Amino acid sequence: GGEVGIGRLSEHGLLEASEALLMDEDTGIAEAAAGTFRAVMQYPAWREAALGAVDRLQNTLAGMPDVQRMRVLHLFIDIGRGSEDAFKALEGRGSYRHVLGAFITDDILLKMVSVE
């Protein structure tokens, strides 16, 4: 089933590859990578592995270009929409502080990208 397939792929570097692809300039590639995270988060057995990737993404947010940073913040929102458990896990990790921080800024360009 889906969980077994996700598990095997995760064991072979799926999440690490998806992290890198999330930073790709091509929006389609990055969206496919985000879809991988959303899919993995549906399975409680693999959620911790995905949350490890979320932690790594959070730790590098400050150094990301604006487009990629907004993409990652949008991913946090999407993951939280997927389930209450996922929302609570991201909330506990402080992910949503980063999302709110993107709106509470004096950087008008960042605000425009956030709303877009």
Image (cartoon, rainbow, N blue to C red):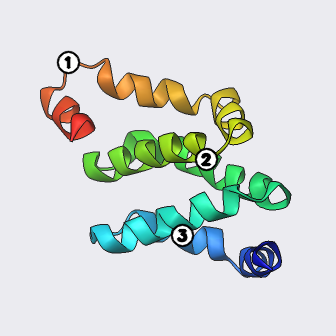
* Residue 100 location, quadrant: top left
Task: Kindly identify which residue carries mark 2.
Answer: 82
Image location of residue 108, percent across then percent down: 14, 26
Q: Residue at x 20, y 18 (%)?
A: 106
Image location of residue 11, percent across then percent down: 78, 77
Mark 3 Cα-neighbour bin, 10 Å: few <14, some 14–19, many ≥20: many
Cα separation between marks 2 and 3: 18 Å
| Amino acid type for the residue under numbered disc 1 | Asp
* Residue 109 location, quadrant: top left
Task: Kindly identify which residue carries mark 3.
Answer: 18
Q: Which mark is residue 106?
A: 1
Would residue 34 be found to the left or right of residue 41 on screen? Answer: left
Q: Earlier in the sequence, mark 2 or mark 3?
A: 3
Q: Please report contact status of discs 2 and 3: CB closer than 8 Å, yes or no.
A: no
Image location of residue 107, percent across then percent down: 18, 25
Cα separation between marks 3 and 1: 31 Å
Q: Residue at x 64, y 75 (%)?
A: 14
In the picture, which quadrant includes the N terminus?
A: bottom right
| Amino acid type for the residue under numbered disc 3 | Ser
Cα separation between marks 2 and 1: 31 Å
